[in-house]
Image: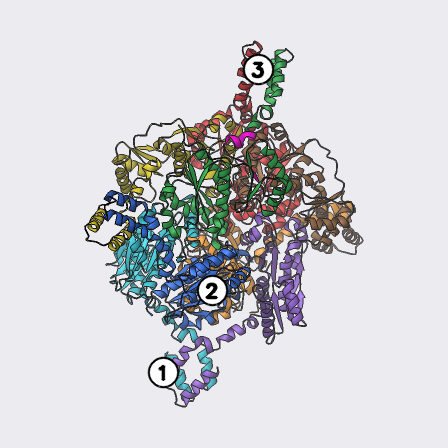
Chain colours: A red, B purple, C brown, D orange, E blue, F green, G cyan, H yellow
Amino acid sequence: MKHIEDVLQKFKDGNLDIDQVVKEIKSLPYKDLGFARVDHHRALRQGLPEAVFCPGKEKEEIVGIIKELKNKNHIVIATRAEQEVADYVLENLPGSIYHKKAGIISYGEFPEPVKTNYVLVISAGTADLPVAEEAIITLKAAGIKTETMFDCGVAGSHRIMGEFETISSASAIIAVAGMEGALASFVGGMASCPVIAVPTSVGYGASFGGVAALLGMLNSCASNVSVVNINNGFSAACIAAMIVKQAKA
Amino acid sequence: MKHIEDVLQKFKDGNLDIDQVVKEIKSLPYKDLGFARVDHHRALRQGLPEAVFCPGKEKEEIVGIIKELKNKNHIVIATRAEQEVADYVLENLPGSIYHKKAGIISYGEFPEPVKTNYVLVISAGTADLPVAEEAIITLKAAGIKTETMFDCGVAGSHRIMGEFETISSASAIIAVAGMEGALASFVGGMASCPVIAVPTSVGYGASFGGVAALLGMLNSCASNVSVVNINNGFSAACIAAMIVKQAKA
Amino acid sequence: MKHIEDVLQKFKDGNLDIDQVVKEIKSLPYKDLGFARVDHHRALRQGLPEAVFCPGKEKEEIVGIIKELKNKNHIVIATRAEQEVADYVLENLPGSIYHKKAGIISYGEFPEPVKTNYVLVISAGTADLPVAEEAIITLKAAGIKTETMFDCGVAGSHRIMGEFETISSASAIIAVAGMEGALASFVGGMASCPVIAVPTSVGYGASFGGVAALLGMLNSCASNVSVVNINNGFSAACIAAMIVKQAKA
Amino acid sequence: MKHIEDVLQKFKDGNLDIDQVVKEIKSLPYKDLGFARVDHHRALRQGLPEAVFCPGKEKEEIVGIIKELKNKNHIVIATRAEQEVADYVLENLPGSIYHKKAGIISYGEFPEPVKTNYVLVISAGTADLPVAEEAIITLKAAGIKTETMFDCGVAGSHRIMGEFETISSASAIIAVAGMEGALASFVGGMASCPVIAVPTSVGYGASFGGVAALLGMLNSCASNVSVVNINNGFSAACIAAMIVKQAKA
Amino acid sequence: MKHIEDVLQKFKDGNLDIDQVVKEIKSLPYKDLGFARVDHHRALRQGLPEAVFCPGKEKEEIVGIIKELKNKNHIVIATRAEQEVADYVLENLPGSIYHKKAGIISYGEFPEPVKTNYVLVISAGTADLPVAEEAIITLKAAGIKTETMFDCGVAGSHRIMGEFETISSASAIIAVAGMEGALASFVGGMASCPVIAVPTSVGYGASFGGVAALLGMLNSCASNVSVVNINNGFSAACIAAMIVKQAKA
Amino acid sequence: MKHIEDVLQKFKDGNLDIDQVVKEIKSLPYKDLGFARVDHHRALRQGLPEAVFCPGKEKEEIVGIIKELKNKNHIVIATRAEQEVADYVLENLPGSIYHKKAGIISYGEFPEPVKTNYVLVISAGTADLPVAEEAIITLKAAGIKTETMFDCGVAGSHRIMGEFETISSASAIIAVAGMEGALASFVGGMASCPVIAVPTSVGYGASFGGVAALLGMLNSCASNVSVVNINNGFSAACIAAMIVKQAKA
Amino acid sequence: MKHIEDVLQKFKDGNLDIDQVVKEIKSLPYKDLGFARVDHHRALRQGLPEAVFCPGKEKEEIVGIIKELKNKNHIVIATRAEQEVADYVLENLPGSIYHKKAGIISYGEFPEPVKTNYVLVISAGTADLPVAEEAIITLKAAGIKTETMFDCGVAGSHRIMGEFETISSASAIIAVAGMEGALASFVGGMASCPVIAVPTSVGYGASFGGVAALLGMLNSCASNVSVVNINNGFSAACIAAMIVKQAKA
Amino acid sequence: MKHIEDVLQKFKDGNLDIDQVVKEIKSLPYKDLGFARVDHHRALRQGLPEAVFCPGKEKEEIVGIIKELKNKNHIVIATRAEQEVADYVLENLPGSIYHKKAGIISYGEFPEPVKTNYVLVISAGTADLPVAEEAIITLKAAGIKTETMFDCGVAGSHRIMGEFETISSASAIIAVAGMEGALASFVGGMASCPVIAVPTSVGYGASFGGVAALLGMLNSCASNVSVVNINNGFSAACIAAMIVKQAKA
């Protein structure tokens, strides 16, 4: 804001007339009016951990970005990290940890959850676990308490109903399922909170890489289900975290 | 078979030699060897009622076909009959009945079910009822006992679980659902018999006229679910009837 | 729970032995163990208004359901009500109101919002308004405070940025847009709360009835965007309401 | 059920009043009321062999699950097993057999078919054989008699018609075909029993990985055809087995 | 060609030098060099009747074009003519005939077929008849002899096989079918000539307006099947006519 | 900018200190910094006529917007106007004109083209004319000279080649075609300028409402072809106008 | 036919009565009535070379089938043969030739074309050549004369028009093109014979593996274009060969 | 044109009569009338660099074509060149350069931009860079000045708005984006020139390899956006270059 102050001073001193000041102001809105702050502080403001999406980035690049982000954050995570990327990062960033199942590298200390509210992460089959784990580690990095229920296919629905309490007391639920994705509707009917459904690419043939689950979830007969992209455990976690952050403890 | 007998008689009488007979036989396999019977008797042999699919047929034509089929059958049904068609048929075929919800016209007496085995027809929402009814009337015409469970959305799954006995004792189950079509998987996991899933065109937006339900059912995590075309309650009933027909009473 | 108490009493009185009691208990879990309450109380428990989805229901049926639900609720709404349905309902339910743009009939008094937290409903074009209104009336019926921003196409993005404060202070945002659906991503980047994106069927040609917007929203580069079915303003409102309900005032 | 008996005893002894017992009962329905049994016994009750779906599971995990299931079953099968998985399992489970074409590992003795009813497995081309074999081995493990007809493309339909007897006497037919998938309709017209159609991913270009066959089968003009997912020979076998199990010998 | 002759004459007379003539020639290739003839004579040269595609044209316009084309042709047909269009045309073009089932108006005399070669038009169901008729009338207008086989669904395949001779002696076959479109493959295997498959929009649900039939036909296991657009009986007839035209009588 | 000037004056007068001014400036960037002008002046600045997209707007609303826009513009157009809308507007806006084929209402005087550069609008079939006309009227309203070539199907390609000069001298070409949309590629190869391809919904069956044309155009082997939405003649005209506006006369 | 003669003889001899003979005849239609001949002789009768489709067959199997077919044919071809398959076959079938570009192995002598009629194979880009070659070698094996035109993209249409004679004199044309597939329409308009269009998978992005070309060809504005599956040069050649075979020399 | 002159001379000399000349002229239009020139000079005339599309061409072939084109051009580029191809070309064409990120090999000197008009290439994410670079190098080879803005995701829209001047002063803008592709609409609203949108295959799940971005761009609410194929940076550059070439300096 240095520049504006100079301009204003010159104006007060009579070295600029009012038209010149107005023109000056008009010319800089996006650059100098502090808007950049919005961006720099977005992660912080949203209560989410800073995250690097690895695909399409060079290993060196990833290390560089993590380091830079770490300067202003307690913890940084890098998502969709393949083993090879992880090997490189762990070697070059001592102290970083590879959460293999989740495909996430974390760098820095996981914060303690400060609230008792929790996000329930529930998944349908073993093959859906990596997506569920992506959500769980992201939530952990955001300082959110999680409960988990795995292997909850709809064809064995009694198992899910047995956990009625855990479901009905959650602040937000992340339902991870491939194939027909019916888990979201099923859990949605039992829950009192938003259910963020994550379709996975688990399945074959007419699952079309997760499209069947995606469509099933979008057409849920439960009115508290919204959906994110196929396999996008990260966004589901961000949304759930935002819900918990503003909830009463 | 008249013709063959004539040929054979001529052969015995010496009016035809063996080569002529063989040639004669070769030339007629499909026309005269009784194959037509296969067709004429198909409905009977398969234990299914004779049925007329109305769309694309003239009203007069429908009445004509029903009359003809009635000659050799106790009951004939006409499916997908709109009100206008029904009005015409009922006027011209005294004694015929219009099952409005099912869109079926029946002509003749419904047979008494002879077995205690039953087909359970279970549907998800009110809007799925016409498809369920198409299946029910078809089964009734086939002399099959039915049990029904309506309004069984997966988001209210406890209602379904309360009917565990009815589900687990069925000989075949027809699960009718639109939207996400999760009902089939859910019931499939509780059943001990084949579940024939009928996706319906109920829904909007990303239901794509029943495609979401169709895909969900095809990707069922329950291994006893097979699927028929969208809204095809008739075929589902035919298949279920065939299962019951050969089951132990 | 009457029945269980009887059983237990008989057991204490020695008229039933322990095996008989256990068997009795096993046979009733879904029917009598109070589970029906879950269903009856779902709307209440979830903090959402009772709602009737009109399509596929008869006019008389709709009136009947509204009346019944009104017994236990302060307000009942009926969504996707066409003018003809509304005319009938208003005539038969004196005091009911038709919110034409939203396609919603309300019956009963809208509760006063008790919190200062609000849901921002932002929509892209004039044609998206009905969907936005469906969300707004639903939220109102749920006792949730709303702010609105209409006509916020991404091609005129400066208008949206001018409302930075309203966006960044919301507890939840419902972004309603057809065509390319870019609004969700754009707003997502500015918000600190979950954005529930509602694709609409507004558009033509390659919009494929809302599929373009739906895909755009699912692929949002903003990590706080989740999506509901095309035109599903109702579910978006339910989810947003659930977020506000558990938020600090 | 141990726990309930304790509770009841305490109640009888006067250590718990009736309200405490009711509360206790309400709190455990899914966990302790024997529902788990439903799950544990599902395979048995449905008359199907216990099966492990290999994709997405670690080799060690697969061996572990097979061993565990073997404790309560005469035979266990593991489907979609690649050669590498099979090598590991066979080494670690002496006595297990790899049915290479079917991609199935079996562990335990195949039961003798007890009925004369049979399932006919008919496939269109050589490339469809693995899917047909998956069905055949699964049926064998379920103790079901099978007949087979391979290489029955519709363009050489006379070959199929020559086996009219085998087709018309089956209790259930599994029709396996890729490309245009016409085999199901063709056989459906000749059969007196349900035809479970299995589209395969055999084909190229506009076969779209089995979608052409899938659509063809769903639109079958024969009313006794239902469909399972692309390449899903296993589910087809389960359904067929369930039909035979309840049929008169 | 009037203009060129003038130019050449001027050249011969010495009023134009050789460069001017060459320039002149270069400047007119498409307009005046008789190329228009290619277009004007295309129908004739290809041995096909002149045809007007009605949709999107005004009634008056259609009458005008028919009249103009009639000047140089013995017969003109107008395809996809709705009843309303036909009424107008018949009133304004005395002598024209409306072939209602085919949706074709013919104006002029149908030529006598000069060859014994014939095109077999075979269709699957009653609802496919209009498309078959479009092909038949077009062939008739092209002076091609036709044989017809209607109601030849693949589920009643014996009826088709009974006409082996008619199939195997055709010069070209037009196979018209909706639903799963299996007829093309089936007939293709029996024929010795090209089969032009016409998928129809007959069907519902997963027939997707003819897409299922289209894909089935494109994936035919018979190597003599090619496909035209859904419901395009006209093009099929044109192709078949071109085959017969160049065939030995 | 009134407000800023006041603030600055107060600052100069000593009634506000520098921090207060800076804060004031930060708080208004989008509202008062003249950004609104961007929007208001967009049409003008882009050299395009102000346009109202009619679908989804009330008749009264349309009249209102046209009137308002007319205040600052010489000409205003309303696109996609049905006859009924046009009737109302013409009655309420004396002097407005309905270009029926184009579906456009114009209000105000069409400007004289000031440049000799022209846009060539070329279309394939009669049914594509409305889309071509939408482009033509829009261009006319933008003061751009147009040349037109109608009925230029690729199957009669010699007609197009005969107009080589008109094609190769254009500043921009709008190629309008349905069905297979090949016109764009064909013309693209002959042109020296950008070709804006407009797929139309003309066609049936596998044209899928313009998708076939759209895909064909996107896959053009000519490297100067870009594509707009199906039937979007308006955007094509805007783009072409922008090219001509900045071209040398 | 041995069996029938025996039966007839027994009948004549009085050892079988007429009913027994008729029953006997009914039981054997498909097996013994010479129908197998249809199949054995199909390739011959259709005037096409025997062909083996390699994908999904073992190398040894391919060699075996080629050998067997060679017994009754002058030439056998194996299509879609990868280099590895070819290496094995050439080693084990001395005298066989690998046409690498076409992916075809031929075994036996190519027949001399006996007719002057020819098939024109025209392709769009270099990448389409393998498909064109598959058609060419197949035609050569069928004894059909071919003409070829390569690299005929529609964006360079004058090159194609320069070969007007070759196009207009062909008996059949095979048009091979990927991307937008416009070649078929373009050539269709110039030809007097059927054009068999072969879409190829050449392209990227929105070509969707050949779907764009496929749709373009199905929607051709030329009425003499039919289409085969993506990359299916073989079927196109079979159809073209059948046309030439019955054409006047 | 040699031949025509001879003909004309013979005509003048009386050795040919006027009919013979006309016939002669008619027979040669495409071959000899100089049309081939159109092709040879297309690149030049269009102001675009000659370019070779590498996929599907042999390495030797690519070198050959580049050499040949270089004879008549200052610079030749080869697009979509993989590292392996580049290695071979660079070795065999000393002086050629591999622009790795862009996947382009250039051979010859890049021309100096002669105009101050520029094309702005703006891209959304790091993974979109290769496509942006393809456009940039192509523009450079065409002698067009470029400005670039990378990493401009819509979720961080203030960054883009800060470059309002660069956007609003461009002659043409190439907007490169994957995922939801919203960048095109956003920039379109700020620009005064045509925006050529290039969807990229960047994304996963429901991005369907770039389809989501493609649809988003086609449905842009900004009327100055047109679209090219997924990842087609080359065509976008050609179109942008054509716009600049004819613009006032």
- Dividing the picture into quarters, in which one does residue A17 lie? top right
Q: Give the numbered dot on residue C64.
A: none
Residue under pointer 3: A18
* Rendering coords of residue A91 (x, y %): 43, 29
Label 2 and label 1: CA atoms lie apart by 51 Å
Chain hosting mark 2: E
Q: Quadrant of residue E226?
A: bottom left
Q: Residue furthest top?
A: A13
Rounded to the nearest angstrom, the CA distance separating label 3 from label 2 is 82 Å
Instruction: Tell me the mark number nearer the camera, choosing from 2 and 1.
Output: 2
- State yes or no: residue D126 in magenta: no
Amino acid type, residue under disc 3 in the picture: Ile
Which percent across, then down, holds residue F53?
57, 40
SS of the residue under disc 2: strand
Q: Which labelled disc corresponds to residue B19?
A: 1
> In the image, are marks 3 and 2 on the same chain?
no
Chain of the residue under the numbered disc 1 shown in the image = B
Q: Please report the bounds of the magenta region as a residue range.
A: F39-57
Is F51 magenta? The answer is: yes
Residue tagged 2: E106
